[in-house]
Amino acid sequence: MSNRPRMNARARALKSMILREAARTTMKTHEPAIFKAADVARELNVSEMTIARMVKRGTLPKPIKLGVRLTGWPREQILKWINDAFETANGKSD
């Protein structure tokens, strides 16, 4: 048995997203440059309301305004946030 602590549900979800992203990147499929709230919610397996609460609390970066009724996050910003959150959840730091 390993002495490593078990990953919590959030860490597992983040790890899963990172692995899916790596697989998609390897397959060279088209990825949007901007993630909308629904995209981020789907990837984190949470509701869009949870995404809004995370932004309000400051745990997720604020989206940028793309138009009158459209906001989103640059793809790289979200992927970096996910990676940082995963490392923090697992006790790793730079």
Image (cartoon, rainbow, N blue to C red):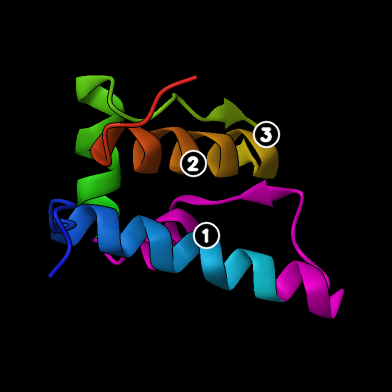
Question: Tags 1 and 2 in contact by the CB under 8 Å rule?
Answer: yes
Relative to 49, does residue 18 appear above or below in the rendering? below
Residue at left offset 27%, top offset 41% = 90
Q: Are marks 1 and 3 in contact (CB under 8 Å)?
A: no
Secondary structure type for disc 3: loop
Question: Residue shown at 67%/34% (left/top)?
Answer: 66
Residue 60 located left or right of residue 68: left
Q: Is residue 71 at all visible to an observer of this figure?
A: no
What numbered label is drawn on residue 83?
A: 2
- Mark 2 to mark 3: distance in Å? 24 Å
Three-letter amino acid code at the position of disc 3: Leu
Q: Which residue is mark 3?
A: 66
Q: CA distance from mark 1 to mark 3?
A: 26 Å
Query: Which quarter of the figure has residue 43?
Result: bottom left
Question: Element under label 2?
Answer: helix
In primary-sequence order, the first of circles 1 and 3 is: 1
Horizontally, residue 46 falls left or right of residue 44, namely: left
Q: Which numbered disc covers residue 18?
A: 1
Where does the image place residue 78, in percent across and percent down from the top left?
A: 54, 40
Q: Which residues are magenta?
A: 24-46
